[in-house]
Amino acid sequence: MPYADHEGELAVRIARDALEAFVLGRARQAFEIPKRFEEKAGAFVTLNEHPSGELRGCIGYPQPFFALLKSIEKGAEGAAEDPRFPRLRSEELDRVSVEVSILTPPQLIEVKKPKDLPKYITVGVDGLTVAQGPFRGLLLPQVAVDNQMDAENFLSEACMKAGLLPDAWLDPATRVYKFQADVFGEMEPRGPIVRRSLEAAHVGH
């Protein structure tokens, strides 16, 4: 069941607070937490530089291991220390916008022939996880939309994220999972929070 706008707004406020508490070394605020946030759910927290939109960090949990509240808080803290970037500094807090993606559990895409995989992926709806042996790579649904990818390109990028060759999705040993996400984000640092309509954005390309 999709998360309501007010739930998404709360998720982003929690993520922003957890991020700032972590970076500044202060206590977290107390929020009134709905029961739904105590249920296990995967979530990712993405930090984007404002106004350029450049990625500044993205960490999360694809599997529903933790309560949603904990997934968001841990994701926010992790995004501040994303190993691809320098640790987020306190002076950057005013220059990053916060986005939260609440994920459905990943589902294995089962096909007779790997070349049929693109037919089962809807750009603007599905995110991907690719797995082969110890290699794992995940791309959120908005990555395909933001980079104007089709399903084949999206599969190739997910493979490369996993450290595999771009055409590794054609290897029967590669497992491809898809998931969906409710995505909410600040329009500007600490600004209004909106739901991202990924399908509409994809159609607009």
Image (spheres, rainbow, N blue to C red):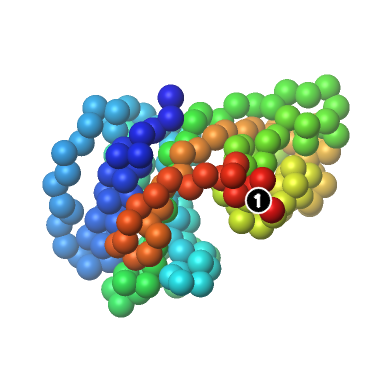
Quadrant in the picture for residue 41: top left
Q: Is residue 174 visible?
A: yes
- Residue situated furthest bottom in the rendering: 91
Query: Residue visible at 16% across and 62% down?
Result: 26
Q: Residues within 10 Å of mark 1 (few under 14, many from 20)?
A: few
The one nearer the camera, 204 or 31, is: 204
Across and down, in percent, residue 189 comes to: 34, 65
The one nearer the camera, 148 or 159, is: 148
Across and down, in percent, residue 179 comes to: 57, 33
Q: Is residue 76 visible?
A: no
130 left or right, relative to 85: right
Asked if 88 appears above or below 79 in the picture, the reply is: below
Across and down, in percent, residue 182 comes to: 46, 39
Asked if 104 appears above or below 28 in the picture, the reply is: above
Query: Residue visible at 31% across and 38% down?
Result: 7
Question: What SS does tag 1 mark?
Answer: loop
Q: How many marks?
A: 1
132 left or right, relative to 107: right
Q: Which residue is mark 1?
A: 204
The one nearer the camera, 2 or 132, is: 2
Across and down, in percent, residue 162 comes to: 66, 49
Query: Residue visible at 66% across and 45% down?
Result: 203
Asked if 59 appears above or below 155 in the picture, the reply is: below
Quadrant where the N terminus lies? Answer: top left
**Which residue type does callout 1 highlight?**
Gly
The one nearer the camera, 106 or 65, is: 106
Query: Residue visible at 65% across and 26% down?
Result: 108
